[in-house]
Image (spheres, rainbow, N blue to C red):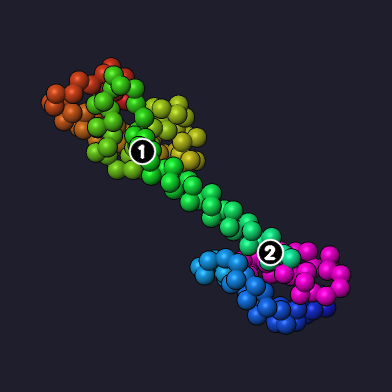
């Protein structure tokens, strides 16, 4: 074991409780272990910068880490508030003249939707789309073929409903 690693382990053992108590007074109980872990991780990375007593140095790192946690918690709370007041966007943004495609796509599995959208909406070639989906080009071609058949069946079901299916939706077949 290297000398600096052994020294750092000793520093950890000597100062852990003090850093834990310091963090517990400054952040929510569920964030204490995160702050302590991040403090010692930052200390390990900057261990060569340590001059003098280690505890004040560690507490300085813990102070900045705790402040970062509080700020990020405030940002998360503000985001949660903002998102709860906004209406969720549609899962498949389509233009208003084509409600049948969204209805038909919603009946497909996630894998089928992804395959079709990579080809039809993102304009990817099968070889490239296969890489995105993590399969061979041949397997992707089979997936798209099967997904198109399922979409065609779903569109036929939508066509029998009062929703009119546009030419664009038919081009996905």
Observer-nearest residue: 148 or 101? Answer: 101
Asked whether, in this view, residue 4 is left or right of residue 128, the answer is right
Q: Residue visible at 45% across and 29% down? A: 122
Asked whether, in this view, residue 89 is left or right of residue 51, the answer is left
Question: Is 44 in the magenta?
Answer: yes
> Which span is picked out in magenta?
34-59
Q: Is residue 136 visible?
A: no
Which numbered disc covers residue 63? 2
Task: Compute the Cα span from label 2 to label 1.
Answer: 38 Å
Which numbered disc covers residue 34? none
Q: Residue visible at 52% across and 70% down? A: 29
Q: Residue visible at 57% across and 69% down? A: 32
Q: Residue visible at 18% across and 28% down? A: 158
In this view, 93 is above or below 54: above
Per the image, the residue denoted by label 1 is 88
In this view, 114 is above or below 28: above
The quadrant of the rendering that contains the C terminus is top left
Q: Magenta span: helix, strand or loop, mainly? A: helix
Observer-nearest residue: 160 or 83? Answer: 83
In this view, 58 is above or below 153: below
What is the quadrant of residue 53 in the picture? bottom right
Observer-nearest residue: 55 or 89? Answer: 55
């Amino acid at each position: 074991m290297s000398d600096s690693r052994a020294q750092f382990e000793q520093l950890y053992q000597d100062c852990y409780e003090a850093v834990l108590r310091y963090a517990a007074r400054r952040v929510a109980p569920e964030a204490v272990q995160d702050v302590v872990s991040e403090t010692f991780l930052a200390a390990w990375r900057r261990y060569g910068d340590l001059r003098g007593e280690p505890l004040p140095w560690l507490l300085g790192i813990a102070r900045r880490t705790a402040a970062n946690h509080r700020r990020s918690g405030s940002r998360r709370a503000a985001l949660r508030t903002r998102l709860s007041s906004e209406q969720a966007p549609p899962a498949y943004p389509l233009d208003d003249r084509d409600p049948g495609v969204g209805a038909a796509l919603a009946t497909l599995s996630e894998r089928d939707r992804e395959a079709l959208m990579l080809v039809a909406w993102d304009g990817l070639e099968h070889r490239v789309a296969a890489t995105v989906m993590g399969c061979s080009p041949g397997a992707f071609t089979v997936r798209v073929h099967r997904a198109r058949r399922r979409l065609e069946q779903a569109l036929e079901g939508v066509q029998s409903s009062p929703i009119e299916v546009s030419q664009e939706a038919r081009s996905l077949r």
